[in-house]
Image (cartoon, rainbow, N blue to C red):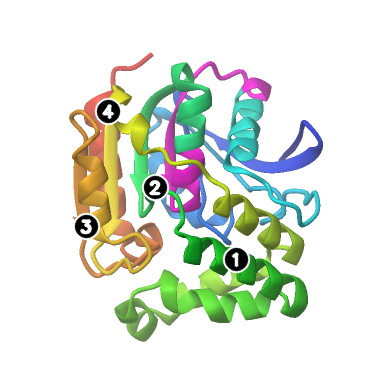
Amino acid sequence: MKVRIRNAEIAYDDHGIGYPIIFLHAFPLNRRMWEGQMLALLGEQRFRLVALDWRGLGESESQGSEAVTMEDLADDVAGLMDALGMQDAILCGLSLGGYVAFAFLRKYPQRIKGLILADTRPGTDTEEGRANRERMAQLALTEGTEAIADLQLPNLLAAMTRQHAPEVEARVRQMILAATPVGIAAISRGMAKREDATVLLGAIHCPTLVLVGAQDRLTPPEVAREYAARIPDARLVVIEDAGHLSNLEQPETFLQELRHFLLTTFSTTE
């Protein structure tokens, strides 16, 4: 399904009835990365499950290669909620999805009833990190999505996943290739501009689950431990044998923790 939000056609899925959960995907993947979790939770018949593609990734329309900020993407989430008649929701974001969740928290705190933050961080990029984002944008524009897949896959997946689960790597590569070069460039540039969300952590009073892969090289467990400790009553789970894409690399463990969090915290929510 697609809906026009501000100046772009945004692709999304919407399944089930109940309290809404919005899944926010990683860079440079798309909403298909959440299919396993959404299919499993659909059987619970307790939640309305929504996932969207960011602009220029997956099936959503691109608006060129200029920076698309985390605030822009947060506005897209709010716009989708409005279009679907949702006053508030639980946000589940991984990596880039977590950055958007932090931006949403800054702009629309009253619309968040729960947070699942996976393999992400509240801090900004270093100067070197911002330079790397621009190099990635240029690589996408000059050499295309195949070059981005070759660059990103070693960082996104644990060595064990690449060695023993080639189907996961193939699936991730397919999602990266579904992106547009301009979309990759725009969001890479937007991530480089993101604000520090560390100051928001102590004011998060909704139920929060923090997940991280034990072999995550991009947002390692020590980063997750540090920021989770600043969120009141947050639960931290380190997922063994997973890298940066923990929900794809260890889907059963990820789902177990996600389901436990949702059913113990929101099972009676109307």
In the image, 143: left or right of 234?
right
In the image, 183: left or right of 151?
right
Q: Nearer the viewer, mark 3 or mark 2?
A: 2
- Residue 222, label in figure: 3
| Mark 1 or mark 3: whose residue is earlier in sequence | 1
| Mark 3 or mark 2: whose residue is earlier in sequence | 2
> Tag 3: residue type?
Glu
Please name the residue that numbered disc 1 is placed on: 175
Percent x, y for residue 248?
Answer: 40, 62
Residue 222 is a magenta residue:
no
Please name the residue that numbered disc 2 is placed on: 123
| Mark 2 or mark 1: whose residue is earlier in sequence | 2
| Residue situated in front as seen by the camera: 268 or 223 | 223
Residue 35 visible in the shown view: no
Mark 3 element type: helix
Q: Say above or below: 147 vs 110.
A: below
> How many neighbours does mark 3 have within 10 angstroms: few (below 14), some (14-19), or many (20 or more)?
few
Residue placed at 20% from the left, 45% from the top? 236
Label 4 to label 2: alpha-carbon separation: 14 Å
> Tag 1: residue type?
Met
In the image, 206: left or right of 188?
left
Q: Pointers 3 and 2 in contact (CB under 8 A)?
A: no
Label 4 to label 3: alpha-carbon separation: 18 Å
Label 2 to label 1: alpha-carbon separation: 26 Å
Label 1 to label 4: alpha-carbon separation: 35 Å
In the image, 241: left or right of 18?
left
